[in-house]
Amino acid sequence: MPPVASVVIPAHDAAAFLGEALAACLAQTLPEIEVIVVDDGSRDRTWDILTAAAAGDRRIRPLRRAAAGGPGAARNAGLDLAEGRWVALLDADDLFLPDRLQRLVGQAERLQADLVADNPERRDFASGRRLGSLLPAAATSAGPLSLLALVQGDMPDQPADSKLGYLKPVFRRSFLEQHRLRYAEDIRVGEDFLFLFECLARGGRCHLLPEPGYVYRVREGSLSQGNAGALQLSRANRRLPGLLPPGAEPALRALLRRRQRLIDFDCFAFEIAGGHPGAALRHLHWGGPAHALRQFRLAAGAARRRLAGRG
């Protein structure tokens, strides 16, 4: 009999924490699961740890990729193998609380949803200290999440630790298969948001629930990729308007344009700071005199810092 849920874990050089992620999956109160772990070209002992764990529990299904293809490629390989009615994604350095899958699958089926997400709980990776929920209470509700609300909840000028792009929903596998939905393999930052956006654009009914269940373990630099990550975010965001359904509301299109301007300002700053003014020009937007002045001051400041470094 097929499992009720498939958990897909992409793992690259994850030997230091993969065992904890596996233990959290195998401790789920929903027993009818499979755990598909994709070793994405690891150079450490990830594969040895994975195969040893699989020998002790038949629910673990290991898959090895010879070369690292990134999180999107690893997740897609896992999705292609999944047999569960529901699919959950888990990053190898994160955890599930014990009742997460049973609770979310039950809620999803009761609500007739295509995807359901809970409110991730943040914990310090080193100490395990709880840092609070990822989302404010106002961001969670039992009603379906709209595309407009999704974008409003993941704008670049929001605090990095309260964005909807960090959600880890549980997906109805038949919905993913019906719409041939897979992760973008050429995007390494923001691929989760791009995938979630496409799910909603294809008509997916997504519910956000206030209870915690996904444990997001915060390591240094894990919540923000800095301006370098903005280059990937810019590429991902440029794909969003092409995914919009016919008749998408003008407010949503306008918000996506604003999101692009904000992301591209970070790209501009990154390229200027790196001494690449030509590349920076590709990210310029005319946003009025104040915006132009801000970009000019940024460029001038970066130039002064480079000249001072040569002195």
Image (spheres, grey):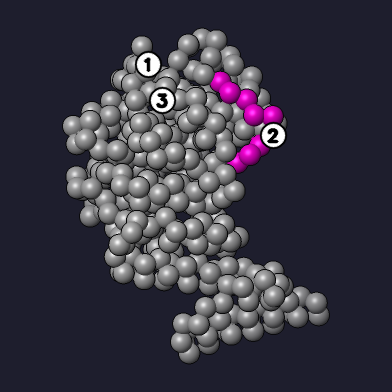
For the residues labelled 3 and 2, the Cα–Cα distance comes to: 24 Å
**Based on the displayed image, in which of its 4 quarters is residue 26 positioned?**
top left
Marks 3,2: beta carbons within 8 A: no
Among the 4 quarters of the image, the one containing residue 157: bottom left
Picture residue at 35% right of the left edge, 47% below the top = 202
* Number of numbered discs: 3
What amino acid type is highlighted by mark number 3?
Answer: Ser
In this picture, is 295 found above or below 269? below
Residue under label 2, please give it: 67
For residue 27, say whether it is visible. no
Name the residue tied to disc 1: 2
Residue placed under numbered mark 3 in the picture: 6
Q: Position of residue 306 (x, y in %)?
A: 73, 76
- In this view, the mark in front (1 or 3): 1
The spot of residue 122 in percent (x, y) is 39, 44
Q: Which residue extends farthest front?
A: 246
Element type at mark 1: loop
Q: Is residue 64 within the magenta segment?
A: yes
State which region is magenta: 62-70
Q: Nearer the viewer, residue 252 or 289?
A: 252
In the picture, measured across the screen, residue 186 lies left or right of residue 207, that is: right
